[in-house]
Image (spheres, grey):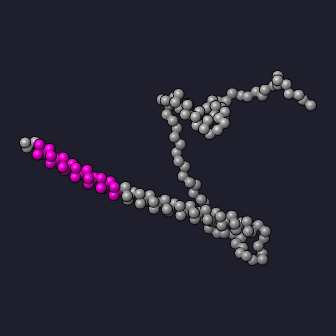
Amino acid sequence: MLKSSSNSVKPITMPREDKEQEEEQKARTAYDLIRMRLDRLEKNIDKPASIPQRRDPRKPRPPPDFVRNVVGSSAAAGSAEFHIFRSNRKREMDRLDYMYKKAEEEELDAKFQERRAEQLRIEEEKTAKKRRKRSKLQKMLFQL
């Protein structure tokens, strides 16, 4: 049996190309990781920070044009038919869910744009009214 001694051989590690990744692997918690990144950003104030773009949710595949092996609750259904049916049904439910969410998102966006346009119109009316008042005051002051 091998005894472990204090003079044991340590494994040789190759230096990494990316020092930031090596440093980030030392973080024990998410808090430490964020702190390390913020410290690095503070050291290099002039360097622009990378802001990741938001990913669009993955669009599901379109349904197949022709579904093979359509077996209902007949006696000829094999042992795998239920699992195939279940996966097809789940895929279709995911596709429908995606379509409903997309439609709801578009509807909410349209409502927001409508409210925003109305608010801008109201603000423009108020600004125009105040502008007319100011011009009247200036005309009165210049007449005196």
Horizontal side of 139 relative to 90 (left or right) equals: left
Question: Residue 143: x, y in percent?
Answer: 8, 43
| Residue 125: in magenta span | yes
Against 3, residue 29 (above or below) is: below
Q: For residue 65, which quarter of the picture?
A: bottom right
Horizontal side of 136 relative to 121 (left or right) equals: left
Q: State the count of labels.
A: 0
| Residue at the limit of the structure toward the left, as seen here | 144
Question: Residue 68: x, y in percent?
Answer: 69, 69
| Residue at the limit of the structure toward the top, as seen here | 7
Q: Residue at x 37, y 58 (%)?
A: 115
- Secondary structure mostly seen in magenta is helix
Q: Residue at x 34, y 55 (%)?
A: 119
Question: Residue 13: x, y in percent?
Answer: 73, 28
Quadrant assignment for the N terminus:
top right
Which residue is more in the foreground, 5 or 40? 5
Which residue is more in the foreground, 60 or 119? 119
Question: Residue 20: x, y in percent?
Answer: 61, 32
Q: Is residue 21 visible?
A: no
Quadrant assignment for the C terminus:
top left
| Residue at the limit of the structure toward the right, as seen here | 1
| Residue 32: in magenta span | no
Q: For residue 89, which quarter of the picture?
A: bottom right
Horizontal side of 135 relative to 27 (left or right) equals: left
- For the record, the magenta segment spans 117-141
Against 7, residue 135 (above or below) is: below
Q: Is residue 81 visible?
A: yes
Q: Residue at x 59, y 59 (%)?
A: 60
